[in-house]
């Protein structure tokens, strides 16, 4: 990926925004279990940060996806993975399909206010018994004249308590699992939409996550994105951007674990010398930095191919897999080097230890990523 002056300018803007508008409030939002999405998104919209790759006719900048990767990476300087995740839902998880396949009506009604920061978006795919197994979702939409009647439940929904709408994957027929699904935009204030209590999580605590219930929810068929039955394909395509965003967003967080630990180990003395003088520590940190640069190269390679219009499902899955495992490994070993101080809540490395654990689960578990990679490598057994 070749960085231009425009890429560097965007990186600088996002980095400064994260350091000024997010990082100082991390402790407050962690304790509250929520961040002020509407307020924060409006500030981001003032800097044209919510529609970087989106259609200019609806307020976007129309830039290629390399700028989204720069955006995701630079957000890491905010030092709050849960807020970054909430932002990513707005920019790279709930809105790509609307931008790519939505009608003019849907784009005016939902995409434009998402880009302007007037709406908070949420993507509703996972269910209590259908997490990474997207094909097995049960939420259904039945036609009734010009409307759909929607019933079901979604689980682990990010931004849900503040959302203005949900980009929702539902079953619209009794066809095969990969052909019976549609993406439908469901406004949060529609009668029958109920958001449950926030889930008390071990990490990502600044992010509001809750179940969402649909009880005979009536929405017009015009709120369907694209053709009926094409939802699974669109969601799989949307997952490519989601997984690349997740991988890119871990780069600075992982790097911060390493650099913060270096500084701490320079200052902390044990047995008459700085901890960093121990070969086992500086060798381990050197290994972590090498792995990080390998991940960064993988993310950039996948981005280049995505910009060229190529299928990056395998590379995006590899990046997602590697990023989740690396942030876990790095935060765990760095926490060990901090000793007792690492086992305190206010320590930045301990926050990465808690927050980073989700990266191997959310957005597709490690096991699902391995299955996808195996499929593209042609190592899975043939179905009879």
Image (spheres, grey):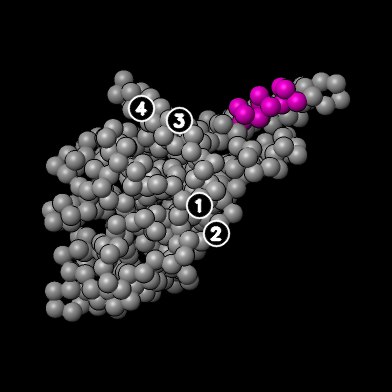
Q: Write down the region rendered in magenta.
A: 258-268
Foreground label between 1 and 3: 1
For marks 4 and 3, give the CA distance. Answer: 10 Å
Callout 3 secondary element = helix
For marks 2 and 1, give the CA distance. Answer: 8 Å
Residue for badge 4: 13
Residue contact between numbered discs 1 and 4, judged by CB atoms under 8 Å: no
Q: Earlier in the sequence, mark 2 or mark 1?
A: 1
Which residue shows up at 31% across the image and 60% down it?
166
For marks 1 and 3, give the CA distance. Answer: 20 Å
Residue contact between numbered discs 1 and 3, judged by CB atoms under 8 Å: no
* Position of the N terminus by quadrant: top left
For marks 3 and 2, give the CA distance. Answer: 26 Å
Q: Position of residue 127 (x, y in %)?
A: 43, 68
Q: Position of residue 107 (x, y in %)?
A: 18, 52
Residue for badge 2: 200
* Position of the C terminus by quadrant: bottom left
Foreground label between 1 and 4: 1
For marks 1 and 4, give the CA distance. Answer: 27 Å
**Disc marking residue 19:** 3
Q: Is residue 306 left or right of residue 332?
A: left
Closer to us: 183 or 341: 341
Which residue shows up at 82% across the image and 26% down it?
270
Magenta segment, prevailing SS (helix, strand or loop): helix
Q: Earlier in the sequence, mark 4 or mark 3?
A: 4
Q: Position of residue 291 (x, y in %)?
A: 58, 34
Which residue shows up at 43% across the image and 30% down it?
20
Q: Position of residue 37 (x, y in %)?
A: 37, 47
Q: Is residue 333 magenta?
A: no
Residue for badge 1: 33
């Amino acid at each position: 990926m070749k960085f231009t002056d425009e890429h560097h300018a965007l990186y600088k803007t996002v980095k400064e925004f994260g350091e000024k508008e997010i990082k100082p409030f991390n402790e407050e939002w962690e304790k509250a279990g929520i961040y002020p999405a509407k307020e924060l998104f409006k500030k981001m919209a003032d800097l044209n940060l919510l529609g970087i790759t989106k259609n200019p006719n609806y307020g976007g900048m129309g830039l290629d996806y390399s700028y989204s990767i720069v955006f995701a990476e630079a957000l890491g300087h905010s030092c709050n993975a849960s807020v970054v995740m909430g932002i990513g839902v707005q920019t790279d998880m709930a809105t790509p399909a609307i931008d790519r396949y939505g009608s003019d009506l849907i784009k005016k009604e939902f995409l434009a206010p998402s880009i302007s920061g007037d709406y908070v978006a949420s993507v509703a795919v996972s269910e209590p018994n259908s997490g990474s197994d997207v094909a097995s979702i049960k939420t259904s939409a039945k036609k009734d004249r010009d409307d759909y009647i929607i019933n079901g439940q979604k689980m682990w929904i990010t931004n849900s308590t503040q959302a203005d709408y949900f980009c929702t994957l539902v079953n619209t027929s009794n066809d095969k699992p990969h052909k019976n699904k549609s993406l439908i935009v469901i406004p949060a204030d529609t009668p029958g939409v109920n958001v449950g209590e926030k889930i008390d999580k071990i990490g990502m605590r600044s992010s509001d996550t809750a179940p969402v219930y649909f009880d005979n929810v009536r929405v017009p068929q015009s709120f369907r994105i694209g053709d009926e039955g094409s939802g699974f394909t669109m969601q799989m395509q949307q997952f490519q951007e989601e997984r690349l965003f997740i991988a890119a967003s871990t780069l600075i967080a992982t790097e911060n674990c390493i650099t913060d630990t270096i500084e701490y180990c320079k200052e902390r003395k044990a047995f008459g010398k700085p901890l960093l003088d121990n070969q086992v520590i500086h060798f381990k940190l050197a290994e972590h930095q090498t792995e990080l640069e390998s991940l960064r190269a993988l993310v950039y390679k996948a981005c280049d191919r995505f910009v060229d219009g190529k299928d990056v499902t395998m590379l995006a899955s590899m990046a997602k897999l590697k990023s989740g495992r690396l942030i876990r490994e790095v935060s765990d070993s760095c926490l060990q080097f901090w000793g007792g101080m690492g086992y305190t809540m206010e320590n930045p490395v301990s926050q990465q230890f808690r927050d980073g654990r989700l990266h191997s689960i959310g957005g597709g578990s490690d096991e699902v990523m391995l299955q996808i990679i195996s499929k593209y490598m042609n190592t899975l057994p043939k179905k009879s």
